[in-house]
Image (cartoon, rainbow, N blue to C red):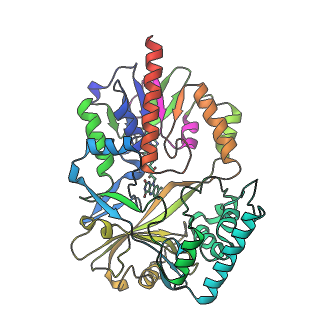
Amino acid sequence: MRSSAPSPASALILGGGLTGLAAAHHLRRPGLLVEREDEVGGHARSRRIRGHTFDVTGHWLHLRDPQIQRLVAAITPADAWLEVERRTRVFAHDALLPYPFQANLHGLPLEVVRECLVDFVAAREAAARDEGPGEGRSGPRTFVEFAEARFGRGIARHFFIPYNRKLWGAALDRLGAGWVDRYVPTPSVDQVIAGALGVPQEGLGYNAHFLYPRAGGIDALPRALAAAIEARSPGSIRRGCEAEAIDPIGRRVKLSGTDAWTPYAALISTLPLPELIARIERVPPAIREAAAALRWVRWRYLDLATRAPIPADYHWVYVPGPAYPFFRVGVYSNACPASAPAGAASLYVELSDRQGAIDHAAIAQGLVAIGALARPDDIAFTEAREIEYAYVVFDDDHGPACAAIHAWLRSVGIRSCGRYGAWTYNSMEDSMLQGIAAAAWADDDDARRSA
Ligand SMILES: Cc1cc2nc3c(=O)[nH]c(=O)nc-3n(C[C@H](O)[C@H](O)[C@H](O)COP(=O)(O)OP(=O)(O)OC[C@H]3O[C@@H](n4cnc5c(N)ncnc54)[C@H](O)[C@@H]3O)c2cc1C
């Protein structure tokens, strides 16, 4: 395939996740995409083990943008997708509640319901007077201030703080509030009261419905993108090829497996931002310093297969209680039966502890307690996985560091985009939109140069 590699004057895309693939698919003139792994997809890859399919924990596709809806429809058959109405739960104080916690307090111990409601009303009153914790003109500064100001100290204490402590670890103390609004549903007073009285408040939030490949595995999406790109331009995706070094002055990249440098007309990178900076030659010290200030959290999770049906019908469940060694558990096969053999289930278990020995017995007992397993013996196998770049930490350094790095990258003609290239929190749809915008940038650049 290498013989048909595009001419040096084309765009070069680093990384074959959804951002890079969407970019390659939208380039007017075919470019070259290089992906370090043997498969494209990045965080949207899937693994198949003994009839079970696992993603890199839950990857549910929420589409809002007509352009991405058209793209998905164009590259996959009409019946390729299941349309799923979300079934999500919160397991707190030994009760399984509908999601979100803040709108479904019924079922918690009465004193907890009372505390949550009283504090919620107090937070609303303080907000109306413009004087809540972090509320008012300046807005909440930290995530914890945001949760207390928006929902009251009770809801923050019983859900937001313990859940996010398990998810973010120590980084919770540094976490800002600027990025959360879109992702945390804010019920009305009516909804909070109805939910506390026992009228379930479901369908709140940005992800009440999602799509998932009928045949199992979110990797159907990156694979379809790659097939469309390669049908149009054979040889334009190079798998198992790592970008090792970047020389922006000479506009060339050193790729693994070749001694020669590969020239480019425009460079789109979807590498995690710290990795990109580490590979660029002659980076100014201030930019290296800014890159050193970027923080992220790693995750550890289990792919878990059962040999028997499971009691739970949920797609995923949030578990704030510190007694449980996981913070979220999801069941692929409850959304997509093809993800597991008949009579079995495929799950992911996101673990709070990121290092040290994994306590499988405690995990199995916890899963039984939350209804994700009937008996520990029903586990057929588990495999531990790690995600190096899971969540970017939005702390005080995040904004200034990103602004400085991206401004410098623009000045040397590099577009860094996607969830980890832009260094943000986003969805697969957002990532593909960023890829499409990057392709337009590269095309414009191309047009300017040939003018
Ligand atoms: C735990 C978790 C759960 C998520 N759940 C959802 C969800 O339910 N719904 C949703 O819409 N989104 C979800 N997302 C977000 C989604 O995964 C991302 O938005 C999207 O996959 C990011 O795509 P990307 O191409 O920007 O980055 P990536 O997928 O990280 O792609 C970057 C690619 O670059 C490659 N690469 C790295 N270094 C090099 C190098 N030196 N040379 C060549 N290639 C290199 C990598 O191998 C990778 O393939 C989730 C993310 C995480 C972490």
Residue 63 image offset from top left, x and y in percent:
39, 51
Q: Does the stretch in magenta take in 260?
A: yes
Q: Does the stretch in magenta take in 325?
A: no
Where 223 sits versus 343, above or below?
A: above
The part of the chain drawn in magenta is: 255-279
Residue placed most toward the observer, 302 or 98? 98
- Residue 241 in view in this figure: no
Where 195 sits versus 240, above or below?
A: below
Picture quadrant where residue 309 is located = bottom left
Residue sitting at 30 percent across and 60 percent down? 83
- Residue 228 in view in this figure: yes
Where 309 sits versus 227, above or below?
A: below
Residue 435 image offset from top left, x and y in percent:
44, 37
Residue placed most toward the observer, 13 or 162? 162
Q: Quadrant of the N terminus?
A: top left
Q: Quadrant of the C terminus?
A: top left
Where 442 sits versus 156, above or below?
A: above
Residue sitting at 23 percent across and 53 percent down? 80
Image check: 120 left or right of 8? Answer: right
Residue 186 image offset from top left, x and y in percent:
57, 64
Picture quadrant where residue 339 is located = bottom left
Residue sitting at 50 percent across and 69 percent down? 351
